[in-house]
Image (tube, grey):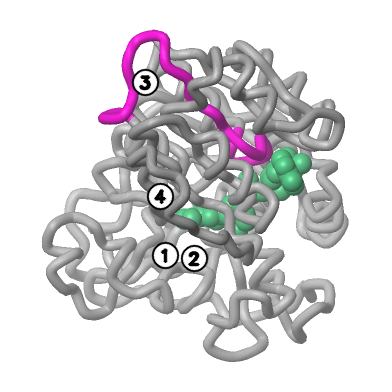
Amino acid sequence: MRAAQVVAYGKPLEIREVPVPEPHGEEVLVRIGGAGLCHSDLHLMHGEIPLLPSLPFTLGHENAGWVEEMGENVQGFSKGDAVAVYGGWSEKPDRFAWAGQEQLTDIRKWVGIGFPGGYAEYLLVPSYRYLLPLGDLSPIEAAPLTDAALTPYRAVKKLLPSLYPGSTVVIIGVGGLGQFGVQFARVLTPSCQVIAIDVDSKKLEIARELGADHVIHGREEDPVAKVKSLTGGEGAQGVVDFVGSSATMTQAWNMAGRQAKVVIVGLAGGKLEFTTKVLNEAELTTSVWGSQVELSEVLELARRGVIRPRIRRVRFEEINEAFEDLAHGRIEGRAVLVPHDTLENAATGPTQ
Ligand code: NAD
Ligand code: ZN
């Protein structure tokens, strides 16, 4: 089968022929319908997050498709079932896995980071327990839900205890993840004002379409001053930073109001100078992917049409160009690798 692999750090992916894995026991072979291109893959391809076990390596941690073949101990699935793949795999469950927080057990075991991922025609999933039935959802549209939507879902939910009617939620960076962040803020906090910040006008236009009350261009205005003025001087009660650079983390922290919550999701490697001069009881935390239960909730919201992915379909031959576009902010929503020529590939849906 074909797989897009990292062969050297900082180099384009290579499309190589690799063996189709054979499932045994609880394992399932999934025919990839869609595999989302995440900005984290750019960090991994450039060696900025040094986690890959060895090269060549197949990336791809946002996967959905159809059950192709099953090991002898698989239960509850049949060939052809449409499934989303939960990617926070763990070889050795611990107390966090027992509590349903498997994504916190060991990032080096995740799909597309520790085990070969979905930039391939087929994906070997270690257990049927990591599969969620899609029902009517298309695997191409479902792929980004497993990370680009799941991660902001968890992050925005973390804000809820700090919010009150009329308070303000700020989403910094409205790319693949942030666009879902705006949608979740709109859905989960309907009585709050939602502000989106980006450095790209097109992304801000999309954020408005998705329900942001105000948008701020981070290079044309001072985001902290603008958020303060839009909140009567109080600041925001909830901020999620989907960039994670020193600049955005500092902005996020400085725009936080009293007892606000600031959640850092982006992995741009930023640093934040934390000083005690801010005596406002604001809290700072991070957020990592999401649990399998949270993924089931995200799929339900998509099934009900409450959240909508914005997708650019990409073929194998186009994957490096798509990553170039992602690096330069030219992907409007999420690029999704569609490795097979399926009927769905030509199907309708929200496309870029
Ligand atoms: P993306 O490239 O699709 O979106 C990033 C957005 O941030 C773009 O719209 C860009 O214009 C905007 N941006 C860049 N600099 C900015 C600035 N200074 N101020 C405001 N906006 C700015 O990326 P993505 O796939 O959405 O991923 C976002 C980040 O989240 C990446 O760092 C990725 O590695 C990380 N991530 C983290 C987790 C997690 O579990 N914590 C999961 C997935 C992705
Ligand atoms: Zn990701």
Q: Earlier in the sequence, mark 1 or mark 4?
A: 1
Q: Earlier in the sequence, mark 3 or mark 1?
A: 1
Q: Is there CB contact under 8 Å for labels 2 and 1? A: yes
Q: Secondary structure at mark 1?
A: strand
Name which quarter of the figure residue 217 lies in: top right
Nearer mark to the viewer, of 3 and 1: 3
Does residue 128 belong to the magenta stretch? no
Please provide the residue range marked out in magenta: 160-178
Q: Earlier in the sequence, mark 2 or mark 3?
A: 2
Task: From the image, tell me which residue sits under label 1.
Answer: 29
Task: From the image, tell me which residue sits under label 4.
Answer: 284
Task: From the image, tell me which residue sits under label 3.
Answer: 188
The quarter of the rendered structure image containing the C terminus is top right
Residue name at image x 66 percent, y 58 percent:
246
The amino acid sitting under disc 1 is: Leu
Q: Earlier in the sequence, mark 4 or mark 2?
A: 2
The amino acid sitting under disc 3 is: Leu
Nearer mark to the viewer, of 4 and 3: 4
How many neighbours does mark 3 have within 10 angstroms: few (below 14), some (14-19), or many (20 or more)?
some
Task: From the image, tell me which residue sits under label 2.
Answer: 123
Q: Is residue 272 left or right of residue 169?
A: right
Residue 2 shows up from this direction: no
